[in-house]
C-alpha cells in the first residue's frame, strides 16, 4: 500500500538496525527526487505482526509516452521484505497490481550489498561489481589498512591537515565548489551533478555528516559526505582539489570518520565500489586499501508490462544500438 512520508519513516525505524541504510530513509529518497526532473518519491510499505514490506523508490515518466518507470534513488534501493511467506507474497502481488494500474512498465533496482535485499526479489538479478566495506568492530582500524593507505594518512597528518566536522554554510559551499569542479574535470555524466540546494537539503538530516580538510591557512582542500543510520555508516560523495589530492586528505577523512562513528555503535563503514565493473578500476583500487572485506553489488529488473516494454525497446534500439545494454534505455 502507498503510505505517506511520515508513515514510511515509522516503518523504516522498525527495520532491524542491520537493514537501516540511510539510502532507504524517506528523507533521503525525497531529497534525491527533488534534485532531478519529473521524479516522484513513492513509499509502498506495509507492516503488521507477520512482517515488513518496505519499498521506497522514484516514479518517473518514460519520455514521449504515457508509460512510467521505477528506479532506485541515487545509490541504492529496492524492496526490503521479511516475515511470513504468505505476507511477503501478498505484498508483492499488491505492489505489482499497483504498478500495472499506474502504467509502470519497467523497474530498475540497485540493491545494497550489505543489506542483501535482492533475496526474495521477484525479478531478474545480476551481479554488477565488487564493493568494499570496513569492519568497524576492530579495535584498531588503522591496522586493517594497507601500507599505502597508512602512509597516505600519515602524510596528511604531517602536512598539518585539520579535520573539521561541520555542516555550516562555509563548508557546504566549499564542498559544492570543489565537487562541481571535479565532476567537470572528469567530464562526468549529468547524474553526477547536483545543485547547492541538494547538498543543503541532504545535510539537514542528523544522519548525514560533512567532514572537511583544511590546510594551514584555513582553506578547505577536500571534503567527504557520510551517512550513518542503524549500525551502518556509508561513504556517499567526496571531492578534493589539487592540494587536497597531493596531501591525501580523503584517506585521512575516511579514517577519522570511521574512528568517530564506531563509538556511535556503527559496525560497518560501507565505501562502495569502482566507477565500473573492472577489477583494475582505480577507484576500486583506492577503496581496497582500506579493507579486505568485499561484497558484490547486484542490480535487478522487472518488466511489469513485458510486451509494451519490449516494443518500446525495439523502437529505441533501432535508432541507437548502444541503448541495447541499458535497462532504462530511454534515459
Image (tube, rainbow, N blue to C red):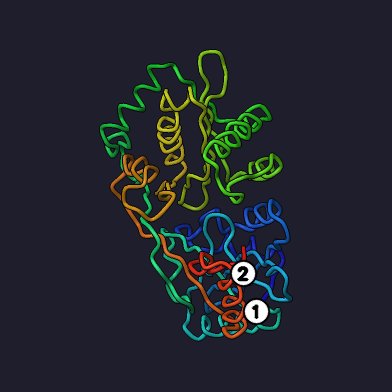
The residue depicted at 59 percent of the width and 58 percent of the height is 73
**For this view, does 90 lie left or right of residue 136?**
right
In terms of image quadrants, where is residue 102?
A: bottom right
Q: Where residue 8 sits in the image (x, y, percent)? A: 65, 64
**Percent x, y of residue 302:** 53, 77
- Check the picture and name the quadrant holding the N terminus: bottom right
The answer to which image quadrant residue 63 occupies is: bottom right
Name the foreground residue: 5 vs 320. Answer: 320
Note whether 207 is above or below 259 in the view shown: below
- Residue, far front: 319
CA distance separating discs 2 and 1:
9 Å
Q: Circles 2 and 1: CB distance less than 8 Å?
A: yes
The residue that mark 2 highlights is 70
* Label 1: how many Cα within 10 Å (few below 14, some 14–19, many 20+): many
Residue that label 1 marks: 99
Ranked by sequence position, the earlier of labels 2 and 1 is 2
Say which element carries label 1: helix
Dot 2 falls on a residue whose secondary structure is: strand
- Which quadrant holds the C terminus? bottom right
Does 66 appear above or below 322? Answer: below
Closer-to-camera residue (327/167): 327
Identify the residue at image location x=56%, y=66%. Answer: 320
Q: Residue at x 56, y 85 (%)?
A: 90
Please tell me which residue lies in front, 279 or 91: 279
Give the x, y percent position of residue 312: 62, 77
For residue 147, side relative to residue 11 (left or right) = left
Q: Residues within 10 Å of mark 2 (few under 14, many from 20)?
A: many
Counting from the top left corner in percent of width and height, residue 273 is at 41, 50
Amino acid at each position: 500500500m502507498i503510505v505517506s512520508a511520515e508513515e514510511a519513516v515509522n516503518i523504516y525505524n522498525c527495520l532491524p538496525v542491520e537493514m537501516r541504510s540511510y539510502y532507504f530513509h524517506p528523507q533521503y529518497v525525497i531529497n534525491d527526487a527533488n534534485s532531478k526532473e519529473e521524479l516522484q518519491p513513492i513509499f509502498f510499505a506495509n507492516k503488521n505482526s507477520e512482517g515488513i514490506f518496505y519499498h521506497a523508490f522514484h516514479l518517473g515518466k518514460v519520455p514521449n509516452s504515457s508509460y512510467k518507470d521505477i528506479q532506485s534513488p541515487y545509490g541504492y534501493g529496492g524492496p526490503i521484505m521479511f516475515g511470513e511467506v504468505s505476507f511477503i507474497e501478498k505484498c508483492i502481488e499488491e505492489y505489482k497490481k499497483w504498478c500495472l494500474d499506474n502504467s509502470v512498465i519497467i523497474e530498475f533496482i540497485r540493491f545494497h550489498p550489505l543489506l542483501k535485499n535482492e533475496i526474495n526479489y521477484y525479478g531478474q538479478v545480476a551481479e554488477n561489481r565488487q564493493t568494499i566495506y570496513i569492519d568497524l568492530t576492530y579495535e584498531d582500524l588503522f591496522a586493517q589498512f594497507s601500507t599505502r593507505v597508512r602512509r597516505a594518512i600519515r602524510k596528511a597528518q604531517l602536512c598539518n591537515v585539520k579535520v573539521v566536522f561541520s555542516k555550516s554554510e562555509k563548508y557546504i559551499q566549499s564542498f559544492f565548489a570543489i565537487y562541481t569542479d571535479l565532476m567537470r574535470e572528469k567530464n562526468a555524466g549529468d547524474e553526477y551533478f547536483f545543485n547547492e540546494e541538494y547538498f543543503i537539503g541532504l545535510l539537514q538530516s542528523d544522519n548525514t555528516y560533512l567532514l572537511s580538510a583544511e590546510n594551514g591557512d584555513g582553506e578547505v582542500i577536500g571534503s567527504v559526505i557520510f551517512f550513518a543510520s542503524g549500525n551502518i555508516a556509508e561513504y556517499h560523495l567526496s571531492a578534493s582539489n589539487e592540494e587536497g589530492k597531493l596531501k591525501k586528505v580523503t584517506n585521512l577523512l575516511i579514517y577519522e570518520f570511521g574512528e568517530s562513528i564506531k563509538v556511535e555503535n556503527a559496525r560497518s563503514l560501507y565505501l562502495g565500489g569502482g566507477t565500473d565493473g573492472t577489477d583494475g578500476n582505480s577507484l576500486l583500487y583506492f577503496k581496497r586499501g582500506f579493507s579486505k572485506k568485499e561484497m558484490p553489488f547486484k542490480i535487478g529488473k522487472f518488466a511489469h508490462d513485458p510486451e509494451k516494454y519490449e516494443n518500446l525497446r525495439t523502437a529505441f534500439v533501432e535508432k541507437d544500438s548502444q541503448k541495447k545494454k541499458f535497462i532504462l534505455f530511454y534515459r
